Each structure stands twice: as structure tokens, then as C-alpha cells.
């Protein structure tokens, strides 16, 4: 079967190790998305971000990540490897927070769309909470998505 990594971790994200884990001898393309902590946020009024704290209920979050991976495989059966890895804990500006990677034999097989779907869907349904700390206080950052029954 094709390699799939779904993980919530406090460890630093190692792009090379994760890519190696989802690359096969038939792999010729990898589409990778990495999200990072911004030091300046333009959501609402522009403001400085000192750090973010990410939290998750790991069993539930990883189960939903596996659901996202299954959805990717159903929509793009040519995808070989999938990595969905979310970092939690206190993270400072310029620190990678998430890695989404999909591999395939060729670049024109939908691998870019699959990776984009991975980050968008993860943001929708995976229960990870983010608290933003600024010089003048802190606030929880809420997403736009509200889960529907059965998702």
C-alpha cells in the first residue's frame, strides 16, 4: 500500500525525513505546503504576533487527518504518498507549523490539487486550536468552518 503519515507532534518538522518517508522508487513529483507562524498578522487590524500556542486532542485530530488522507486517495488515486503533520505547542514567528505533502509519479496527475485539498480540508475538520499571543494580550483564533453531522 502507499505510505501515509498523519501526525500531531511537538517535535520540529523535518521536511526531508517526511518527504523521504512518502517517496517511492516510482515517485517523480512532490507537492508540498508548509504553513509558518507570521510575526506580523494582517487579519483584522495589522498587528505583531509574539508567538502562537497550538493545542489538539491528539486521538481525534489524528483520526480526522486520516479521514483527509482517505478523501485525497479517493479523489486522486494516482497519489502515492501523503504526509499530514501538524505541530503543537508554543511556536514563534518563522517556525513551520504544518506540513502537507503529496507525491505521485508525475506532476500533471493532480498532485498539486491533492496537496491544496489536504491543507484546506485539514483546516476545515481537524480539531486543532490556536491561541495568538501579542504584545498587548492574547486571543483564540477561530476558523470559519462549523462541522456538520457526520463529518
Image (cartoon, helix red, strand yellow):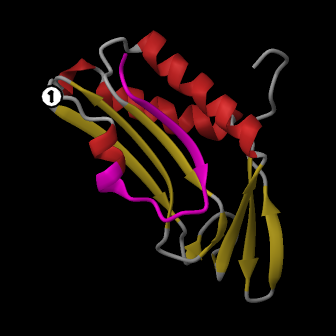
Q: Position of residue 139 (x, y in %)?
A: 82, 69
Residue 118 in view here: yes
Q: Is residue 144 something one can see in this rendering? A: no
Q: Callout 1: helix, strand or loop?
A: loop
Q: Quadrant of residue 30?
A: top left
Q: Can you give x and y, in whole percent of width and height, for residue 19 in the image?
A: 30, 45
Q: Would residue 73 be found to the left or right of residue 108 on screen?
A: right
Q: State the extent of the magenta-drawn residues as a range.
A: 1-17
Residue in view at x 18 percent, y 23 percent: 105
Disc 1 packing (10 Å; few <14; some 14–19; many ≥20): few
Q: Nearer the viewer, residue 136 or 128?
A: 128
| Residue under the image location 40 percent in, 27 percent down | 114
Q: Is residue 11 covered in magenta? A: yes
| 64 over 133 or under it: above or below | above
User: Does residue 58 lie above or below 150 as drawn?
Assistant: below
In the shown orientation, is residue 142 left or right of residue 87?
right
Say above or below: 37 vs 111. below
The location of residue 78, given as percent across then percent down, is 30, 14
Residue 37: image quadrant is bottom right
Residue 53 included in the magenta stretch of the image: no
Instruction: Give the residue pinned by disc 1.
Output: 25
- 56 with respect to 90 (left or right): right
Quadrant (top left/top right/bottom left/bottom right) for the C terminus: top right
Residue drawn at point x = 78 percent, y = 52 percent: 142
Q: Nearer the viewer, residue 81 or 38?
A: 81
Residue at 60%, 68% in the rendered image = 42
If the image is split into quadrants, where does the N terminus sit? top left
**Left or right, 133 with reference to 21:** right
Amino acid at each position: 500500500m502507499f505510505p501515509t503519515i498523519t501526525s500531531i507532534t511537538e517535535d520540529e518538522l523535518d521536511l526531508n525525513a517526511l518527504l523521504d518517508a512518502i517517496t517511492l522508487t516510482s515517485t517523480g513529483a512532490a507537492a508540498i505546503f508548509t504553513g509558518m507562524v507570521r510575526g506580523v498578522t494582517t487579519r483584522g487590524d495589522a498587528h505583531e504576533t509574539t508567538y502562537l500556542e497550538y493545542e489538539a486532542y491528539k486521538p481525534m485530530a489524528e483520526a480526522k487527518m486520516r479521514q483527509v488522507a482517505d478523501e485525497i486517495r479517493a479523489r486522486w488515486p494516482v497519489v502515492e504518498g501523503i504526509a499530514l503533520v501538524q505541530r503543537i505547542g508554543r511556536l514563534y514567528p518563522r517556525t513551520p507549523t504544518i506540513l502537507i505533502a503529496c507525491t505521485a509519479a508525475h506532476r500533471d496527475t493532480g498532485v498539486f490539487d491533492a496537496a491544496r485539498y489536504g491543507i484546506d480540508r485539514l483546516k476545515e475538520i481537524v480539531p486543532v486550536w490556536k491561541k495568538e499571543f501579542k504584545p498587548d494580550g492574547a486571543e483564540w483564533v477561530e476558523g470559519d468552518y462549523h462541522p456538520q453531522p457526520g463529518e
